[in-house]
Amino acid sequence: MQIKREDFITELLEEKRLRQLIRKGIKTISERKNEEQQLRRIIRKLITEAKAGELKVHDETGMNYLENLFSNTSFLTDLKGAYNSLTSNSEQRKSFSAHVLNAMKGLLRRDEMNRQEDDETEEVGPTSLKATPGERGEPDIDLNVTDNEEEIKREEVKIESEGKFELLPGMDETGAQAAEVVWKSLGSLIQNELVKARDPRDRSILAKYLFENVTAYFTEWEKAMISKFGV
C-alpha cells in the first residue's frame, strides 16, 4: 500500500507539531518546578525568620543560649531524628539516651577543665628564664622543669582521651552507634553556645537546663514510640 505524498507530508507536520508540544510541555514543567523550588526556599526563609523573631527572651543569658540551641540550630531535629530511627526495641533507645547524656556530661566537664587551666596560666603569667647567679656565679636552674612538662603532657593526653566518645558497657550497641554518629553534630552545636558563655553562672544554668530538657524530650519521644510501635 502506497502512502500519498500529501498524507506523508501531513504526518511529518503532525509529528513535528507533537514534538514541539512535548518540548514546550517539558519546558513549562521545568519552569514550574523551578518556581516551586524557589517558592519553597522563600517560605522556609520566612518561617525561619518568623521563628527567630518569636524567640523567648529569658532573664538569664544561659537560658537564652539554650533557647538559641534548641530553636535556631538543627540540635533537636538531629537528636529526634536519630532517636526515632531506633524502632526495633526500647533497649536501643535507652542506650542511645544514656550515651548522649553521658557525652554531654563529658563535654561540659572538659570545657570547665580547659577554662580552669586557662585561668591558672593567666595567673602565673609568662615563665621567666632569667638566671640567678649562685655562689660560683653559675645560673640557678630549676631541675623540676622537665618533670613539670611531662606532667602537663600526661594531663593533656588524659583530657584528649576523655574527648573520645565513651561506649558504656552492657548497653545496646545499635543505640550506642547511633548516638556516636549524631554526637558529632550535637557536640559541636553545644560547644558553639558554651564558647559564648564566659560567666560561670551562665554555663551552670545552660548545663542544668540542657540536661533537664533533653531528658524530658527523651521521655516524651519514648511515650510516642511505644504508642506507635508498641516496643
Image (spheres, rainbow, N blue to C red):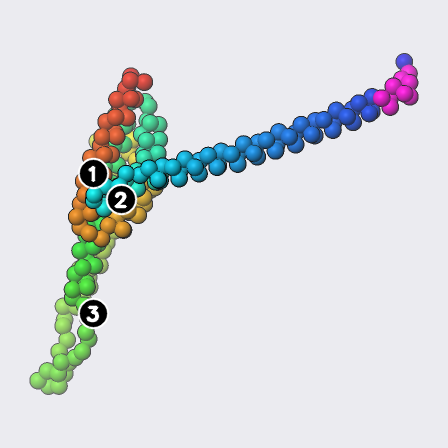
Q: Quadrant of residue 145?
A: bottom left
Q: Residue furthest left?
A: 135
Instruction: State the CA–CA distance, disc 3 to disc 1.
Output: 38 Å
The residue labelled by disc 3 is: 126
Seen at 25% across and 32% down, the residue is 97
Residue 141 x %, y %: 14, 75
Q: Position of residue 188 (x, y in %)?
A: 32, 45
Give the residue number, with chain letter if any, for mark 2: 65
CA distance for labels 2 and 3: 34 Å
User: Is label 1 in a helix, a strand or a loop?
Assistant: helix
Label drawn at residue 209: 1
Between 8 and 166, the one lying in front of the other is: 8
Residue 67 picture location, percent across and down: 28, 40
Give me the residue at 23% from left, 39% from top: 210
Name the side, left or right, on which 78 lies relative to 201. Answer: right
Of mark 3 and mark 1, the one earlier in the sequence is: 3
What residue range appears in magenta?
2-10
Tag 3: amino acid: Pro
Q: State which mark lies toward you, 2 or 3.
A: 2
